[in-house]
Amino acid sequence: MFGFLNLNKPPDWTSHDCVAKVRKILKTKRVGHGGTLDPMATGVLPIAVGAATRLLAYLPENKAYRAKIQLGLSTDTDDITGKAIATCPWPDLTLEAVKPHLAEFIGNIAQIPPMYSAIHKDGRRLYELARKGEIIAVEPRQVKIDQITVLGWLEGEFPQIELDIHCGSGTYIRSLARDLGKVLAVGGTLASLTRTESCGFQLADSINLEALMANSEGLISPRIALAHLDWISLTSERIIDWFHGRKINLTDTNVMIGSLVAVESLEAQFLGIAEIVVREDEYYLQPKIVIQQ
């Protein structure tokens, strides 16, 4: 088996739970996922099967989420599953008062990951420290948020705002919820989260585990999953060099030096990923990932 799945992760499942279930359904051990989702979250969880696990790092990085943020409430996990650590009812808070602050989170920003996260600190995961009551200073990380659109607003003592968020890899929506609450001086926590896009896969095209159990055929091919890359076809003679890891001379120089390309045979068999390199004014394909099916 070789290819990808666009899985719609159910609530209360870890990403690893989903991988284990897919292994059982497909009867294969070599299964991995791209981009962890918290147990409470649902939505797109890219799954790679077989040698496609080696290609996860080459899928598109941008992600999109539909998030509901509860304002006036702060929790230790920065989501609704955590323990409440502060409340600040604010029934008079309006959407008009919140909207201007959303712009503060657009672009390249420094974001502090949640204490309950899988990030390593001195060889230990942050959530392991948090569960033992060891709260430490977490260094901010540079992340990028491209767009935030308001989808809805629910009034009440603890107002709730629904957002459509487009961002880069590494962005924590729980941190965004917490930080939006901070700038409003009322606190905030993530009430629900659905990932609508990840690694080029869309929620509208995803399948659930029940559908996979009913029909385990039809993995997504690299030609679709890697459509964001340029593709180069090799003749049978050049394929021999490719499988031996040798550089392959390019006659087409209408390519960007250092860019990555997907490589296939003239018969459309996927062969791997290469980097465009130049030596003494000669352009070459330098194999990075070689796939033998």
Image (cartoon, rainbow, N blue to C red):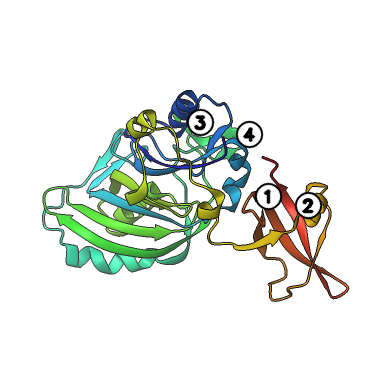
Rounded to the nearest whole Å, what is the CA distance between mark 4 and mark 1?
37 Å
| Residue nearest the viewer, comparing 22 with 158 | 22
Rounded to the nearest whole Å, what is the CA distance between mark 3 and mark 1?
43 Å
Position in image of residue 200 (x %, y %): 46, 55
- For the residues carrying marks 3 and 1, which lies nearer the camera in this image? 1
Position in image of residue 230 (x %, y %): 61, 64
- 237 displayed left or right of 43: right
Rounded to the nearest whole Å, what is the CA distance between mark 2 and mark 1?
8 Å
Rounded to the nearest whole Å, what is the CA distance between mark 4 and mark 3?
11 Å
Relative to 97, does residue 194 appear above or below in the rendering?
Answer: above
Asked if disc 2 and disc 1 are in contact, CB closer than 8 Å, the reply is yes
Asked if disc 3 and disc 1 are in contact, CB closer than 8 Å, the reply is no
The residue wearing badge 3 is 129
Rounded to the nearest whole Å, what is the CA distance between mark 2 and mark 4?
39 Å
What number is the disc on residue 271? 1
* First-in-chain label (2 vs 3): 3
Q: How many dots with numbers?
A: 4
- Disc 4, SS: loop
- The residue type indicated by label 1 comes to Leu
* First-in-chain label (4 vs 3): 4
The residue wearing badge 4 is 123
The residue wearing badge 2 is 242
Position in image of residue 74 (x %, y %): 29, 43
